[in-house]
Image (cartoon, rainbow, N blue to C red):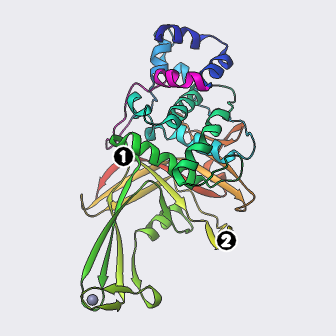
Amino acid sequence: MKASFAIWLARADKEKVFEEISHPENVEKMSYLLKPSSSPKATLNSTDNSPKATLISTATSMSTKSPKSSYISKPVGLRNIGQTCYVNAILQAMVCAYDIWSGILPNDLSNSHFLKYLVTMLNLMRFRSDKVDPKYIVARLGSFISKARGKTFVPNQANDVPEVLGHILDDILTCCPSIRNVFTTSYRIEMTCDTCGTSSCSEDIITILSVPIRKTVNLSIQQFFRTSSLEGENQKFCVACGENQVATSEVQLVKPPQILIVQLLRFTQVGMGSYIKNTMKVTCDSDISLIEKIVEPHTKHNYKLISVIDHSGTHSNGHYTCFVQDRASKQWFWCNDSVVEKTNISLCMNPYLLFYRFEQLEVL
Ligand SMILES: [Zn+2]
């Protein structure tokens, strides 16, 4: 099965390969063959720059090509099949941040029909040189999100990237909890009554870090992990005092992820289905840091920017594109549905979701 698949892939007729792989009846068996051979763990200080997949090793075992010659560093374009730019942007970002899904094991895929399609699609995008039609993944997305959120989701209309990506990440966690450290962030909120000094703690685990907008991503993250005074209407009930009191809130990082996904909170709801957008220009910092004070005090986790999903226009009439960086050459590409061209990340005008990859641990 594998050998015949390798010969099949080596042929020039890749369109036929895609059509057969992406057809619903063939996805299940093909997704197994397309499964990456290695399972990157949430290791600190990773230096791996070469995507690995069974597809490469299987195909190259049949030829004399080096493994990297099969990998296409320029992202493949994706057809827009009717207001599906949000799907395309998510797929481009996930291909780039392959740490998120490359650790999914074949057995994990048996728990989610949607994940089978997704992993097959993502692997396929890494090895195609011409544009891909996302129709099967879009078709599956409708029923998948509808079930996840308990109400109808229409895939061919303007949809919110963080909501859709959030459901996808939750599904990966459900099917494959062993890779949770790759993209979940754990933080603690400590409330202290200013009157009596009584403290209470709560912890939260998230897949997307939603931060207020500031001029740079670093400043936005700092604003999230800040100490603030809760006064007036924001006072907190203190159990010891038995009444609302002015309190101090401190948000502290507990466990940082390997891939950090940051959402800039650009949209504010002002009525039923009505939103205003904060169009502030935000600098996409190439390097950011998370300070960790609880588990490993006096350490700084340094990250590198690898992908950005950009949102232009308004909430109801907007357009998503995706900036991705090739890890080997460090070249940035701008993916606007089926159009993919070289660019510079400084040209990203409306960053909305940013993907950072852990680079190194620094002792302060
Ligand atoms: Zn108190």
x%, y% of residue 3?
A: 48, 8
Q: Is mark 1 within 8 Å of ligand 1?
A: no
Residue 15 found in image quarter: top right
x%, y% of residue 25?
A: 58, 23
**Local crowd size for mark 2, using a 10 Å CA cut-off: few (<14), some (14–19), many (≥20):** few
- Residue under pointer 1: 180
Whether 175 is drawn above or below 205: the answer is above
Can the viewer see residue 30?
yes
In magenta, the rendered stretch is: 24-47
Which element type, helix, strand or loop, lies under badge 1? helix
Residue 241 found in image quarter: bottom left
Whether 277 is drawn above or below 359: the answer is below
**Local crowd size for mark 1, using a 10 Å CA cut-off: few (<14), some (14–19), many (≥20):** many
Residues at circles 1 and 2 in contact by the CB criterion of under 8 Å: no
x%, y% of residue 47?
A: 38, 36
Which element type, helix, strand or loop, lies under badge 2? loop
Give whichever of 272, 118 is nearer the camera. Answer: 272
- Label at residue 71: none
Residue positioned 40% across, 68% down in the render: 225
Q: Which quadrant of the frame does ligand 1 lie within?
A: bottom left
Which quarter of the image is occupied by the C terminus? Answer: bottom left
- Residue under pointer 2: 272
- Label 1 vs 2, first from the N-terminus: 1
Residue 249 as seen in the image, left or right of residue 95:
left
Give whichever of 310, 330 is nearer the camera. Answer: 310
Residue positioned 53% across, 59% down in the render: 263
Q: Amino acid at mark 1?
A: Arg
x%, y% of residue 162?
A: 56, 55
Gap in angstroms between the C-alphas marked 1 and 2: 35 Å
Q: Amino acid at mark 2?
A: Met
Residue 35 lies within the magenta run: yes
